[in-house]
Image (tube, rainbow, N blue to C red):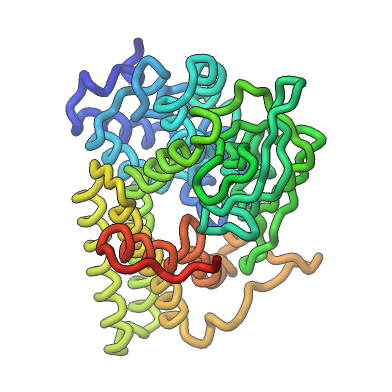
């Protein structure tokens, strides 16, 4: 066993964080130095092959899936060690992870609900970053209303699930080999009843993936069409018709410890906007100074809430909903603050190459302006994806506060 693969339980939090920090310092160099800070929401197209190589480099050194139990290839890191891991990664300005859905969502869900065969088949490939995963939840008529799923799956005599329907806003489906899909497997059911959680290969004739061009001009989201797509009967997680429970388990992991690293990134963005305000003189405006101060306070509130509720398994979902509302609204407002600080320049776009395509956003002539424009545009979606503001407010009002249910169409 090498020093980098010792179980985390044998180390203090400081030793664990220090070891990871030292590894990052020694390895974010050479070919990986150019990808520091790239990727993430709105920028997933940036340097994807290099980021994939970087993550496989992490895997070879034992720095993926650190929170998983040792028997499944993880390091058995405690909750506090995982917090330190994500914070050190963000502080190092390391590139955005490409296997987030597999490592932080599907893997823990399979550990909780999967069969031994499923764990043996999929977990090692997630640890090694040999397979990437997409999330098949949202649909055109059921975005944040997951219980209204219309995609169907029937079990054929050939021993396979046959899947028909459409998913939308499927992040990185065009770069993934598999998707976990919530589909309706029981005829005549509605809402959360009769759903099943299926593991579906994407490289097959019955699957069509169409990228969706976003406001930013990039396409990290996709539409995914299933036309008699198939997966083996054994590729169901949990019991047939009880996929809602599995899907909700996964959503608990979605708003887990990795959000602490996200907040370090938010703090870096706020620091850069503050620096820009001082550089261009907009910080002399009392209104701008107030907005910056409010943003700083808001970020402290987000972190305090996250630390206070990190281990909270709230059955109502209210804790997770409050967290989503806090950071989504804060980040949207930060994009507006960036435009305010830039002033009239925020209305002009990046220059173009001779071929008429936008220059690489890392070009010194374009980087700062385009970076903040992209932040402003993409953060409009923060209050929609992962559960819209309206849905989160309904969860809090109805499940936590006990207010009357909002009127629903019959």
In the rendered view, tell whether residue 351 sits above or below residue 59: below
Q: Is 317 displayed left or right of 354 in the figure?
A: left
- Residue 372 x %, y %: 50, 70
* Occupied quadrant, residue 85: top left
Give the residue displayed 62% in from the left and 45% down from the top: 188
Q: Residue at x 43, y 63 (%)?
A: 391
User: In front: 93, or 80?
Assistant: 80
In this rendering, the answer to whether 351 lies above or below 14 is below
Q: Residue furthest top?
A: 1
Identify the residue shown where x is 45% and y is 71%. Answer: 407
Q: Is residue 319 left or right of residue 164?
A: left
Residue 295 percent across, percent down from the top left: 30, 71
Camera-side residue of 17 and 100? 100
Residue at (42%, 67%) from the top-left corner? 389
| Residue 365 coordinates in the image, percent (x, y) | 59, 69
Q: Is residue 325 above or below residue 282?
A: above
Towards the viewer: 280 or 80:
80
Splitting the image into 4 quarters, where does residue 232 fall?
top right
Please give the count of numbered marks on the rendered protein.
Answer: 0
In the image: residue 80, left or right of residue 40: left
Question: Which quadrant is the C terminus positioned in?
Answer: bottom right
| 146 or 371, nearer to the observer | 146
Do we see residue 271 in this rendering? no
> Horizontal placement of 327 versus 296: left or right?
right
Quadrant for the N terminus, please: top left
Is residue 131 among what the camera can see? yes
Q: Position of residue 341 (x, y in %)?
A: 41, 80
């Amino acid at each position: 066993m090498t020093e980098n693969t010792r179980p985390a339980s044998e180390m203090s939090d400081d030793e664990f964080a220090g070891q990871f920090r030292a590894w990052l310092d020694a390895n974010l160099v050479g070919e990986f130095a150019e990808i520091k800070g790239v990727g993430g929401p709105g920028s997933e197209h940036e340097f994807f092959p290099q980021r994939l190589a970087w993550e496989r480099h992490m895997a070879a050194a034992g720095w993926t899936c650190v929170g998983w139990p040792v028997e499944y290839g993880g390091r058995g890191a405690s909750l506090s060690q995982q917090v330190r891991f994500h914070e050190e990664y963000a502080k190092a300005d390391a590139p955005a992870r490409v296997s987030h859905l597999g490592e932080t969502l599907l893997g823990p869900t399979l550990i909780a609900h999967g069969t031994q065969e499923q764990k043996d088949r999929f977990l090692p490939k997630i640890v090694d970053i040999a397979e990437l995963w997409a999330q098949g939840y949202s649909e055109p008529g059921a975005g944040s209303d997951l219980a209204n799923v219309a995609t169907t799956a029937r079990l054929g005599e050939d021993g396979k699930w046959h899947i028909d329907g459409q998913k939308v806003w499927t992040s990185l489906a065009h770069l993934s080999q598999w998707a976990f899909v919530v589909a309706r497997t029981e005829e005549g059911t509605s809402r959360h009843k009769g759903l099943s959680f299926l593991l579906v290969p994407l490289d097959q004739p019955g699957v069509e993936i169409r990228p969706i061009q976003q406001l930013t001009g990039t396409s990290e989201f996709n539409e995914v069409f299933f036309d008699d797509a198939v997966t083996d009967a054994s590729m169901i997680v949990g019991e047939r018709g009880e996929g809602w429970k599995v899907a909700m388990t996964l959503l608990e992991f979605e708003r887990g410890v990795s959000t602490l690293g996200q907040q370090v990134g938010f703090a870096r963005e706020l620091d850069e906007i503050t620096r820009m305000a001082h550089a261009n003189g907009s910080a002399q405006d009392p209104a701008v100074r107030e907005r910056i101060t409010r943003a700083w306070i808001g970020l402290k509130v987000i972190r305090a809430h996250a630390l206070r509720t990190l281990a909270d398994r709230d059955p109502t979902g209210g804790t997770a909903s409050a967290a989503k509302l806090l950071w989504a609204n804060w980040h949207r407002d930060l994009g507006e603050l960036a435009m305010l600080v830039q002033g009239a320049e925020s209305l002009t776009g990046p220059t173009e190459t001779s071929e008429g395509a936008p220059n690489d956003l890392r070009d010194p002539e374009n980087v700062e302006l385009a970076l903040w424009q992209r932040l402003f545009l993409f953060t409009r979606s923060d209050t929609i994806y992962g559960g819209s503001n309206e849905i989160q407010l309904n969860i809090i009002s109805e499940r936590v506060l006990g207010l009357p249910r909002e009127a629903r169409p019959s």
